[in-house]
């Protein structure tokens, strides 16, 4: 439970700082988001490596220190799927800012994954939710969708009032919105896949221990495996690093175009990304995918509030936007106080003696 609370603080604090720094980077170096994402992946890989490495003295090794990876539990195929999917989602999610998508709109639209996760869990994983849970999720998603619709109407009215120019900017804006819709649905499936991945790994681990106990096997002493969230965090980023080399010239040009005043923002953004993503992976391991998405939804609402106040977006808010935001915030605050459903899940069962996670 303490791990989940600490992870919650990492998400609400680290992710909030990360998005704030992201908006500063967009203002000063808007065409460097691919390089920024690469920097995040490098820093996360380096800082997560000690979590999966085994540093032990060894008289048989040539050096003073024998460096090896600790035993892993997650299937290799699952790691590759997770790494590829996470890379696609991270890159596309950051690049949409080049399509005239603002940070507040990005945060609100991505938060609609809460209701999508509930629908996916109901139809595919046989999860059951109480009526108040459904009502809160619907209120949150409805408020966020209303914000997006209101924003689109304001974009159209602004363009119509400025000049009879082509709608190229609006076309790019709708393309960015389509990419956001795709990443939102993608993140929903990815969260459910991670929950399934952890459950499969725990089940396989218990089955292996049971077979060893039946055969009375005495295996050589091995270092303990890393936490599953740490294993998933490291490999999902380390495996993805070569994918950035698919566009090496773009990577070089973007790093070269970073403004001198933005170097510190890049460093702090990458470090805060490590804090943020670590909290996300711990929550995904310790709780359900729905709880994780709820936490991220509340974080994105906080991001929305900070962005509109600090960067002055509140000056252009309409009554619809204020009502939608307050409704979503109130529903999100009420959800943790609601009774949870006790219906079983179709995700592979937890090992004997383990605790089944609540929805």
Image: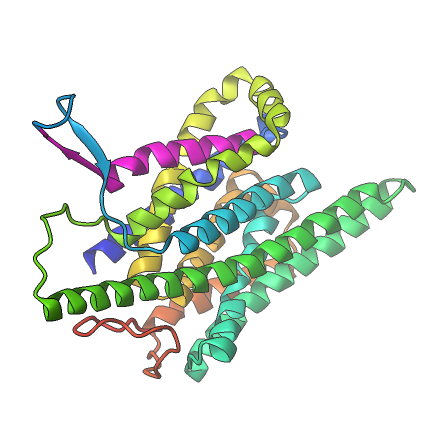
Instruction: Please indicate whether residue 192 sits to the left or right of residue 7 in the image.
Output: right
> Which residue is painted at 38% across and 73% down in the image?
347
Is 232 above or below relative to 112?
A: above
Is 245 above or below relative to 286?
A: above
Looking at the rendering, in which quadrant would you find the N terminus?
bottom left
Whether residue 135 is visible, yes or no, is no
> Which residue is painted at 31% across and 38% down in the image?
48
Based on the picture, tell me whether residue 212 belongs to the magenta stretch.
Answer: no
Residue with the most extreme right position: 164
Q: Main secondary structure of the magenta part?
A: helix
The image shows a total of numbered marks equal to: 0
Quadrant for residue 313, please give it.
top right
Looking at the rendering, in which quadrant would you find the C terminus?
bottom left
Whether residue 328 is visible, yes or no, is yes
Residue range in magenta is 34-58
As rendered, which of 189 and 247 lies closer to the eye?
Answer: 247
Which percent across, then down, holds residue 164?
92, 42
Which percent across, then down, holds residue 72?
27, 50
Which percent across, then down, holds residue 148?
65, 57
As rendered, which of 174 and 194 lies closer to the eye?
Answer: 194
Instruction: Please indicate whether residue 160 sits to the left or right of residue 203 in the image.
Output: right
Which percent across, then down, holds residue 225?
21, 50
Based on the picture, tell me whether residue 39 belongs to the magenta stretch.
Answer: yes
Quadrant for residue 213, please give it.
bottom left
> Which residue is painted at 39% across and 70% down in the image?
334
As rendered, which of 345 and 208 lies closer to the eye?
Answer: 208
> Which residue is painted at 44% across and 39% down in the image?
18
Colour setting: rainbow
As rendered, which of 158 and 75 lies closer to the eye?
Answer: 75
Instruction: Please indicate whether residue 271 sits to the left or right of residue 225 in the image.
Output: right
């Amino acid at each position: 439970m303490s791990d989940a609370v600490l992870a919650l603080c990492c998400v609400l604090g680290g992710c909030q700082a990360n998005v704030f720094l992201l908006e500063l980077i967009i203002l000063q170096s808007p065409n460097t988001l691919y390089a920024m994402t690469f920097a995040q992946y490098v820093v996360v890989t380096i800082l997560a490596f000690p979590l999966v490495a085994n540093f032990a003295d060894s008289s048989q090794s040539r050096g003073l220190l024998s460096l090896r990876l600790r035993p892993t539990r997650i299937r290799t195929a699952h790691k590759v799927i997770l790494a590829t999917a996470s890379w696609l989602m991270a890159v596309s999610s950051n690049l949409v800012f080049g399509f005239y998508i603002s940070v507040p709109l990005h945060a609100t639209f991505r938060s609609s994954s809460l209701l999508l996760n509930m629908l996916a869990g109901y139809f595919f994983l046989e999860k059951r939710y109480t009526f108040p849970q459904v009502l809160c999720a619907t209120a949150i998603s409805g408020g966020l969708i209303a914000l997006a619709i209101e924003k689109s109407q304001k974009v159209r009215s602004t363009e119509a009032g400025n000049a009879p120019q082509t709608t190229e900017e609006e076309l790019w804006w709708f393309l960015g919105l389509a990419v956001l819709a795709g990443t939102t649905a993608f993140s929903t499936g990815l969260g459910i896949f991670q929950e399934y991945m952890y459950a499969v790994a725990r089940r396989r681990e218990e089955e292996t221990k049971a077979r060893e106990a039946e055969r009375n096997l005495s295996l050589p002493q091995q270092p303990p495996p890393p936490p599953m969230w740490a294993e998933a965090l490291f490999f999902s980023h380390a495996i993805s690093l070569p994918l950035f080399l698919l566009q090496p010239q773009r990577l070089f040009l973007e790093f070269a175009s970073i403004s001198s005043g933005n170097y510190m923002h890049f460093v702090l953004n990458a470090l805060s990304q490590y804090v943020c993503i670590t909290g996300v992976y711990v929550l995904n391991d310790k709780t359900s995918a729905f709880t994780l998405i709820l936490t991220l939804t509340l974080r994105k609402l906080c991001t929305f509030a900070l962005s509109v106040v600090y960067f002055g977006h509140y000056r252009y808010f309409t009554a619809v936007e204020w009502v939608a935001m307050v409704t979503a915030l109130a529903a999100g605050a009420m959800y943790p106080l609601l009774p949870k459903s006790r219906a079983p899940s179709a995700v592979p069962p937890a090992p004997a003696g383990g605790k089944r996670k609540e929805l």
